[in-house]
Image: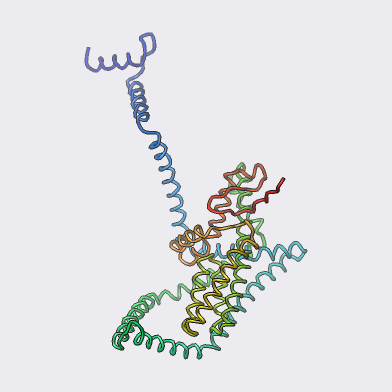
Amino acid sequence: MTGAACERSRLTSMSGSDDKPRGSLFDALRDRNRVVTSDLSASIPRGLRIATAYSWRFLVVAAAIGVGIWLVIQLKLLVIPLLVAILVTALLWPAFSFMLRHRVPKWLAIVISIVGALAIVGGLLWLVVWQIGRQWSSVQDKTVQAVEQFRQYLMDGPLHLSEDQIDGLLDQGWAFVQQQAELLWSGALAIGTTVGHFATGLLLALFILLCLLADGAGIWRWTLRLFPRRAQPAVDGAGRAGWGTVVNYARTQLLVATIDAVGIGLGAFLLNVPLAIPIAVLVFLGAFVPIVGAVVTGTVAVFLALVYNGPLVALWMLIVVLGVQQLEGHVLQPLLMGSAVKVHPLAVVLVVAGGAMIAGIPGALFAVPLAAFVNVVAVYLAERAWETGAPTHGELIWSTVPRPRRTRS
């Protein structure tokens, strides 16, 4: 008997008794590999098996998210106008839906909403330009005085710097400014393209805004048809819950931004801080980036007060900014929104920082509403709320839906 025949006879005896049909060599090897694999799997700790199972799934999800972010960056000239139009639609939606409920024709409600928004933005810009043009000469004079006072403080203060040292620091600062100017000038050829992209994006955002206001329901029905029929109820419910969260976020941020701007702008006016109206407009715009925007705009207001009015007025300006922010965080947000879109400060800072790192200013602006939308959609799908019709109560990062109050028995 040859060696191959002996091997086949041995494998056949392993696979069963003589009265059973003989398996092939490959079947025997496959059974043998299964036994070895089973023994190897049994020898791996259970915790390691669970960790590896989670790891490869996490890698797949991370790869999908990475591809999605890459596509968004590549299509930013389309994505940014789309997000701007959606956010503006959420801002206008309460007033727009109010007019529709009171039997105002849709075309007239669209005209009033868009023209009113453009009038408000144009009025704010006109006020900024008007006050800057009116106070520019006095601002220049106070700037020169502030620089001279700071220079004298460096010489007479605890640092005791000489004029040569101060001039050297100024020369270094001027050289740094020139370097940055050269970097900006090197991209001057792209200014026309950038302006063209901005104008195109503005027109595209306006067109998308008109479409959303005119036929938002039809667009959503068409989007639903892209999903399988069995998944359409879940997608429809999750999308509506997410849209309600974005509307709540936009409405509350608009009210809070207005109150912040009025409070800080009025404080700057009463303290005789120059450029009070531009400060108020800056605070209004910055308030749409929660926490981070308020801190940055408040710092600008205090800095202007310090430069133009001195440390005492700057201290009072700091008190005003902190008072308005405390009023916003502890009174306005809970009163205006309740438990809807109640964002933890840590989540806001991390989400805004991540959005700024990925997409700059647009990323910081859209980070929180996008995260809130994704959060409420995930909670809605995880709780299968479309089957029961009950509101979602879970939370992943923060609570983005109102919770029913508990009644005492």
Q: Residue furthest top?
A: 19
Query: Seen in the image, is 27 located left or right of residue 217?
Result: left
Q: Nearer the viewer, residue 280 or 188?
A: 280
Q: Nearer the viewer, residue 97 or 143?
A: 143
> Dividing the picture into quarters, in which one does residue 264 lie?
bottom right
In the rendering, at what x and y percent does residue 254 appear? 61, 67
Query: Seen in the image, is 324 located left or right of residue 31?
Result: right
Q: How many marks?
A: 0
In the rendering, at what x and y percent does residue 91 appear? 63, 65
Q: Residue furthest left?
A: 2
Rendered view: 201 above or below 18: below
Q: Nearer the viewer, residue 365 or 15?
A: 365
- The image quadrant where one finds the C terminus is top right
- At 38% from the left and 37% from the top, the residue drawn is 48
- The image quadrant where one finds the N terminus is top left
> Dividing the picture into quarters, in which one does residue 266 lie?
bottom right
Q: Residue furthest right?
A: 103
- At 62% from the left and 79% from the top, the residue drawn is 123
> Dividing the picture into quarters, in which one does residue 81 lie?
bottom right
- At 41% from the left and 43% from the top, the residue drawn is 55
In the rendering, at what x and y percent does residue 285 appear? 55, 71
In the rendering, at what x and y percent does residue 82 appear? 55, 62
Color theme of the render: rainbow
Query: Seen in the image, is 140 located left or right of residue 383?
Result: left
Rendered view: 16 above or below 92: above
